[in-house]
Image (cartoon, grey):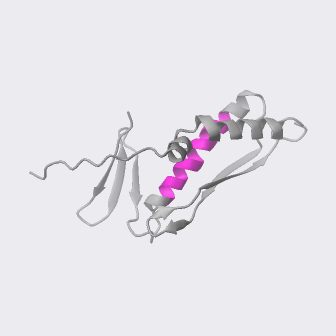
Amino acid sequence: MYEIKVERTEDGRYIATNERGAVIELSGDGTGPHFSPVELLLVAVAGCNIVTTEPLTAQRGHRMTTLVASATSEKIERNKLGPVTLRYSAEPPAGDADAEKVFRDVAERVEERHCTVSRSLREGTPVDLVLDDAS
């Protein structure tokens, strides 16, 4: 089970904490230096894909010289994102003729089947709201 908590502090900031103690400060309105919730969703898509694709490609003997994943989306309604585009920028190692094909095959398979975040978004994982008593 995964669990994070987001708390509004007394000074009006929003702090997210996971069970291991990592902390991220969120921007409630998308201004300032902190990630907005929508940006964190995109971080989750790009992050899930790259941290799964990179080691699988390397295990096959084809570690990319450089590898960057980015995710973009636009609002299509006031409170709804359109499709997310996941883009890789990858440089294969010099002299490795098979690296690009292996990387592409792994990246496609990861996005389609192995990235929990991409798959959850694509299949529409429901969000259940539970309001605890204020007492």
Residue at 54% in and 46% down:
122
Residue at 44% in and 65% down:
79
Whether 95 is drawn above or below 36: the answer is: above
The image shows residue 42 at horizontal and vertical percentages of: 54, 55
The image shows residue 126 at horizontal and vertical percentages of: 40, 45
Q: Is residue 103 magenta?
A: no
Residue at 23% in and 63% down:
10
In this rendering, the count of numbered labels is 0
Residue at 33% in and 60% down:
14
Compared across the picture, whether 130 is left or right of 134 comes to right
**Range drawn in magenta:** 39-55
Q: Name the residue furthest left.
A: 135
The image shows residue 56 at horizontal and vertical percentages of: 68, 31
Whether 129 is drawn above or below 3: the answer is: below
Q: As rendered, which of 93 and 99 lies closer to the eye?
A: 99
Q: As rendered, which of 4 and 129 lies closer to the eye?
A: 129
Q: As rendered, which of 24 and 40 lies closer to the eye?
A: 40
Q: Is residue 43 magenta?
A: yes
Q: As rendered, which of 82 and 91 lies closer to the eye?
A: 82
Compared across the picture, whether 135 is left or right of 45 comes to left
Compared across the picture, whether 11 is left or right of 133 comes to right
